Amino acid sequence: MSGGRLRTLLFKCHFYYYYFFCVFVCMEEGGKGKKGGGGGKVHCEMPTSLMVGRCVTRPRFALLAAAIAFSVVAVAVNAAVSGVPVAEVAFAPYNNFGEAQGEESDADELSSEGSNEDDNFCFISHGCWGGKPPQKQGQKDVAALIAKLIEDGERLPEKRDERIRFVLAAGDNFYLNGVRDVYDKRFFTTFEQFYGGSREVQRVPWLLALGNHDHQGNWSAQVSYTYATRDTKSYIRRWSRISSNVTAVTGRWYMPHAYYAIKVSKDMVVVVIDTVLLHNCHERLHTCWDNGKQKWLVGHWLLHTYASVPYKVVVGHYPILSNGPHENFAWLQDWLIPLMRDSCASIYVHADNHYLQVSKHGFQYYANSGGGAGLGLHYPLRHKNWLVNESVFHSVEYGVMVHCKKGRNLTHRVLSRTGKVLFSFVSWESDDGATLEKCLANLTTGVDVVRSMEGEEYGLLLCFPLMILVSPLLLVLMSIRRRHRIIGRRRL
């Protein structure tokens, strides 16, 4: 098994042993585990994929942790296909999680259909969308627009190049205080039912980020809901008490971790970050539940793992170059703007401010897609001192953004709630084409050098265990030889 496949398999195992680690590690942390909804169950603010390091300093848990992890690997390999999220089926040709199943299945058959698709596609982005029922008319209009864009792309021949492959949701998925647990009815009333619709609509995955309002509740429940299709009957039983028109769990929701990366085509990767987590401990990263590893991991994805991927889309909740009133955090600017530049990224999609805006810095665009209408437009532009020089478009109204990859071009449109085009722009436009190619060439050259050095180090690491195994044998042989010499001398 390759290193990438093994990492993917262990990453997926996160959801199986999450609560085991939470009980044994978070309780030891003295308060990191806390009571959540759902019958007083303990949930944890430290993903288990990053808890293993804590076991090093707590030896009495290390053996138990290892036993659970390895036993779970066997369970993950034999996991039922019915529990696979739509995103992992649709994007299996471009990622390793499909291979981690360990055998051919219905998922492989479905994913093979996706591998024959052409390279032209679109995706929708919006944020601040999770309004509490009864939803206002603005959010109803946005939901109807999303459904129409998806259905037109599938049904109209002239729109085939604009088929919606996925939807990006840039946080604040549930106002005002997130969700209580993985069975919270808001998953039904705010997402499954409200953004439901035709079969075409239900087959398009949503790639979601966490917002500040999500962190006010049990954010880990949003992560766990990614695999809700493994327990469909329980959801139907609960939701039937709410509505007679029960919608089954569609599997569209995709948030396998608080931050993650997923390839959506052979030449595009989406990197979702948790800006709220970073902000809460940016001055002391070691106080994060992940010990601040998010920064390193996101940089590794953009500059190393997916360095050769031409189109990189970064998604987070907090703004960087917006017109306010929410602050553009200096720590986020200092970290992400250089990273966007150095990794040749195309666009950063965010929300937080409840309007539509586009800014440009260098060759990168920063798109505020906060017109999802989950809480209304209560942040109008009133103070001129909020304006940033990088802003190229601003409109205080509901709407979404549609991003389309056609050939070598990545185009973007800002749409109002009625579908009217308010603004359009192009990432790495024709005048910037040579710059993108040059940027990628410099980036991949640097990555090749690093990989070469890592290969040499890896070779040394392989030799080291062999040396440990062989050394005792050599010592024994040397001792025997020395003994024979001494005996021979005594005989003389």
Image: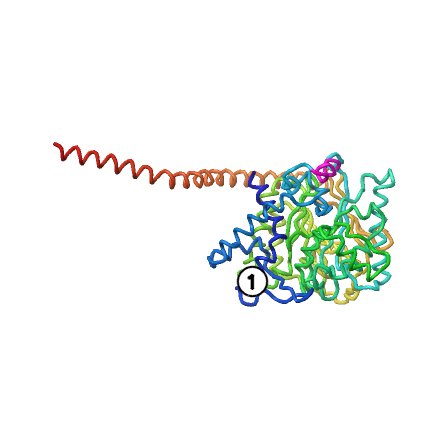
Secondary structure type for disc 1:
helix
Q: Nearer the viewer, residue 125 or 71?
A: 71
Residue 108 on the magenta span:
yes
Q: Quadrant of residue 209?
A: bottom right
Residue range highlighted in magenta: 105-113
Q: Is residue 438 above or below residue 219?
A: above
Number of numbered discs visible in the structure rendering: 1
Q: Is residue 237 above or below residue 92?
A: below
Residue highlighted by disc 1 = 26
Q: What residue do we see at 82% from left, 62% from top? A: 242
Q: Quadrant of residue 135?
A: bottom right
Q: Quadrant of residue 291?
A: bottom right
* Drawn side of residue 63 relative to residue 235, left or right: left
* Drawn side of residue 127 relative to residue 151, left or right: left
Q: Amino acid at mark 1?
A: Cys
Q: Position of residue 128 (x, y in %)?
A: 75, 60
Q: Which corner quadrant holds the N terminus?
A: top right
Q: Position of residue 265 (x, y in %)?
A: 70, 40
Q: Nearer the viewer, residue 450 or 33?
A: 33
Q: Main secondary structure of the magenta part?
A: helix
Mark 1 is surrounded, within 10 Å at the Cα level, by few (under 14), some (14 to 19) or many (20 or more) other residues, namely: many
Q: Position of residue 411 (x, y in %)?
A: 76, 44
